[in-house]
Amino acid sequence: MGTEFLKIKECDEAQEIIQDLFDKYCNAESEEINCEDAYGRVLFNDVYSRMDFPPFDKALKDGFAILSEDSYGASEESPNTLEIIDFLEAGSITDKKVEKGKCVEISTGAAMPEGANAVVMVEYCEKFDDKVNLLTTATPSQDVAKKGSDIEEGNLILKKGDVLNPGKIGVLLSQGFKTIEVFKKPTVGVISSGNEITMQGEDLPFGKIYDVNGNMIKNDAVSCGADAKFLGVVRDNYDQVKEKIRESLKDVDILLCSGGTSAGLGDVIKHVLDELGEVYIHGISVQPGKPTIVGVIDEKLVIGLPGNPVSALMIFNAFVAPPLTEVAGIEKDFEQKVIKAVMSRRIHSPVGRMQYQLVKVNGSEIQPIFKDSGAIFSLSSADGYVKVEKSVELLDEGEEVEVYLFN
């Protein structure tokens, strides 16, 4: 069941096709969830305050709520004495009004009683019987949080695209939100294919290798905001691959298949896509990662990544990660993940094909990692990659280049 590559797509064309397919078949959707479950989720809409916060003038310290003018001139040598008419703790209220010569003992967080406009901390007071000596002068609004001083009703408090951390969730809770509308995570399934693949925990016969791509790509998809699952390994058997793809598409929005994408006799994903759907890309003019397949089955994206781990990760980061983060509502500017550095060694590149060269960043220099696309340990030390344009044969030592940091 051998095949030839369709017309190889240039990188820019491939990126445009993939973006268009995401736009057509993977629209961003929302869902309403409890705020208590919202950590790490992405807001779908701007959020406005429902009320002033604090909703009342409140004491910021334990002490005595007074008329500030009643403290003028007070000192340790010459205290001012006031009558205590009530005690307020957080959550309690009083119908008594603070007038000249009177005060209310108050706890942090309690609503200020009518008439009072300042708090004198307990450390600067001497209480005896139903009276208190003020040992210092207070200014108006001292140690008082005014109503609406933190948030005023109707103000924008969180923006669409904000990732909800504990602080942002706290803002929602302070406004009485029980539920919130967030971006629904796109569901991504990941399949590894290949007769040579063995799962961890099993014996490793000679000639076999443990699966790397399945969970590696799954975790990369999770970092893009997806709800991703590794769906297991399938052999290079046409019927098995077809059935696995067909079953997997019932539960996911996007299916990523690793391996089985080149023109070898055992590679069948392209033929399955031909039968069940439509192939849009079969081969990208890039190294590593040329044997990449992109198709659609039942209005769902199926992307065949190369089997070599380096190739799979490079293609995912360069072509899949940007549109996937958009669907997940994550406003990530991938151009901001580009830094400039100087080559510590030269790179030779084949003319006629874009090359993605793994590099390690060391201060203002970068060290090329010269290993083949199946060398998994090169990934553990790589910080990103350099794009070598198809018309460029050599990047020389000392030349300044742009480094695309991994997602």
Image: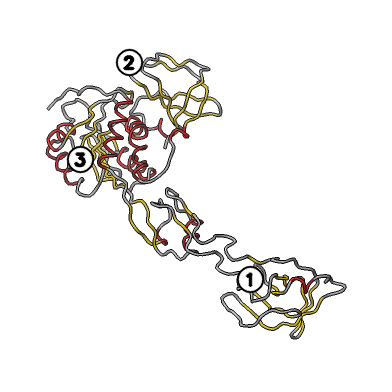
Name the one closer to the observer, 67 or 19.
Answer: 67
User: Label 2 near label 1: C-beta < 8 Å?
Assistant: no
What residue lies at 33% left-to-right and 19% top-to-bottom?
353
Q: Identify the disc placed on residue 352.
A: 2
Tell me the residue that label 1 is attached to: 108
Assign a secondary structure to mark 1. Answer: loop
Question: Can you tell which of label 1 and label 2 is closer to the viewer?
Answer: 1
Assign a secondary structure to mark 2. Answer: loop
Assign a secondary structure to mark 3. Answer: strand
Question: Can you tell which of label 1 and label 3 is closer to the viewer?
Answer: 1
Q: Identify the disc placed on residue 167.
A: none
Q: Callout 2, which amino acid?
A: Gly
Position of residue 60 measured from the top left corner of the image (x, y, whole percent): 65, 67
What residue lies at 53% left-to-right and 17% top-to-bottom?
398
The local crowd at label 2, few if under 14, some if 14 to 19, many if 20 or more residues have their Cα within 10 Å, is few
Name the one closer to the observer, 131 or 346.
Answer: 131
Disc on the earlier residue, 1 or 3: 1
- Left or right of residue 85, residue 188 in this image: left
Position of residue 222 measured from the top left corner of the image (x, y, whole percent): 36, 45
* Residue 151, image quadrant: bottom right
Q: Residue furthest right?
A: 77
Disc on the earlier residue, 1 or 2: 1
The image quadrant where one finds the C terminus is top left
Tell me the residue that label 3 is attached to: 234
Gap between marks 1 and 3, in whole Å? 63 Å
Disc on the earlier residue, 2 or 3: 3
Q: Callout 1, which amino acid?
A: Thr
Q: Residue furthest bottom?
A: 129
Q: How many marks?
A: 3
* Residue 39, image quadrant: bottom left
